Image: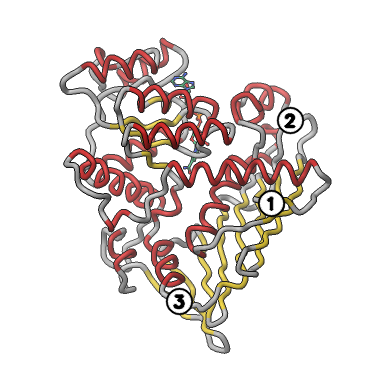
Amino acid sequence: MVGGGAGAFIGAVHRIAARLDDCYEFVAGALSSDPGRALASGAAIRLDPARCYTDYREMAHAEAAREDGIDVVAIVTPNHLHAPVATAFLEAGIHVICDKPLAISTAEGEALAALARRHNRVFALTHTYTGYPMVRHARELVASGAIGDVRLVQVEYAQDWMAEADKQSDAFQHSDWHNDPHRAGPTGCTSDIGTHAFHLAGYVSGIRPSELLAELHAFTPGRMLDDHVQVMLRYPNGARGMLWSSQMATGCENALKLRVFGSKAALAFDQESPNELWLTPQGGSGQRLTRGRVRGAAAEHATRVPSGHPEGYLEAFAQLYRDAAARIHAATAGQPVPEATAGLPTVDDGVAGMRFIDAVLASHRAGSRWTAL
Ligand SMILES: NC(=O)c1ccc[n+]([C@@H]2O[C@H](COP(=O)([O-])OP(=O)(O)OC[C@H]3O[C@@H](n4cnc5c(N)ncnc54)[C@H](O)[C@@H]3O)[C@@H](O)[C@H]2O)c1
């Protein structure tokens, strides 16, 4: 693992997810930018001191040289390091599991995609919410034609953690990487959670917009990056959509919601109730579909315990790790990509997310003009 030292958020979640299905052993890390903290963080989780590194480049070289070196690296640093770290490990022949957004520019993202292909390495991107069985089922339902032609895609991802008074203080705004364009990239909320919403909408609906019209906003005085974004979407098949993301939406904890309206039926998913999915036929009443009860290869592949026993965020994360492990085993054995892992987001999804960010910025800067995507 690179990143994820003491006090970090998502690294610990990745470690739980990696262990949940007995597919990984956690053996080495460059866990922090601060050398003392990197070593102490490794010691705290009982890593072999010889495999606690203070520099990710040194780790890539040393691990590639070991007979028992790592097969795959998890990258959980702030955004600006995703591309340099992934590049170092891909060049050392090591598979990559990277958190989103893929990079801080489209050029960086495209170079990573090319590098992963050249080295024939697995590159998984942790768009966590695609690991939910009911999201996989929704995607399968749309692909099977169960809702007819997609007409409308409405997605929102709202949080309120930036609305808290202490997150608006000068001290926080100047120390946190989320407000630093050099470390977060050219957008704030858009890169942080807008990319999740954008990816989920395309993942389930099966269609990607060709044009968008966007407005970015920063509610916090002095904030350098957006903490709010609203986007209108047009699709090549004539469908329309809207995407809204905000980190200033008081009362919203992790409110990622998707609705897809088709000519025959509509689907609705709410991340905070991930064991259910609503299917409403045209002219009929909504049906609550539940994890463990629905029949379908995609949902069953991502389900661990019987219905009525809640699964959640950690299992969704673990599903991405399990799919990545299956791909790594197949790659090692010279076998084709296992069909069951088709739902795993990859470096190409990351590039699409970077193009979304570029188009949002271009539209906003042009006074919210329709912009090709
Ligand atoms: N998939 C998701 O749902 C999800 C959720 C939260 C965050 N994220 C993404 O995960 C990444 C990390 O976010 P976070 O909230 O955990 O950030 P964080 O600030 O809590 O943790 C970042 C960690 O990276 C370490 N780091 C920084 N520079 C380093 C270097 N040169 N070498 C080694 N380690 C270094 C820091 O010391 C820290 O331990 C971001 O890209 C973010 O967008 C994804």
Q: N-terminal of the two: label 1 or label 3?
A: 3
Identify which residue, 342 or 134, lies in the foreground: 342
In the rendered image, which quarter contains the N terminus? Answer: top left
User: Label 1, on which residue?
Assistant: 372
Residue type indicated by callout 3: Gly
Quadrant position of residue 126 = top left
Q: Secondary structure at mark 1?
A: strand
Q: For this view, does 225 lie left or right of residue 329? A: right
The residue at which mark 2 appears reads as 224
Residue drawn at 53 percent across, 82 percent down: 264
What is the C-alpha distance between the residues marked 2 and 3?
A: 44 Å
* Real-space Cα separation, disc 2 to disc 1, in angstroms: 25 Å
Residue most extreme to the top: 36
The residue at which mark 3 appears reads as 145
Q: Residues within 10 Å of mark 2 (few under 14, many from 20)?
A: some
Secondary structure found at label 2: loop
Residue 92 at what x, y percent from top left? Answer: 31, 22
x and y percentages locating residue 148 in the rendered image: 51, 79
Quote the CA–CA distance across marks 1 and 3.
Answer: 27 Å
Q: Amino acid at mark 2?
A: Met
Q: Position of residue 157 (x, y in %)?
A: 60, 53
User: Does label 2 or label 3 sit earlier along the sequence?
Assistant: 3
Does residue 2 sit above or below 366 in this rendering?
above
Q: Residues within 10 Å of mark 3 (few under 14, many from 20)?
A: some
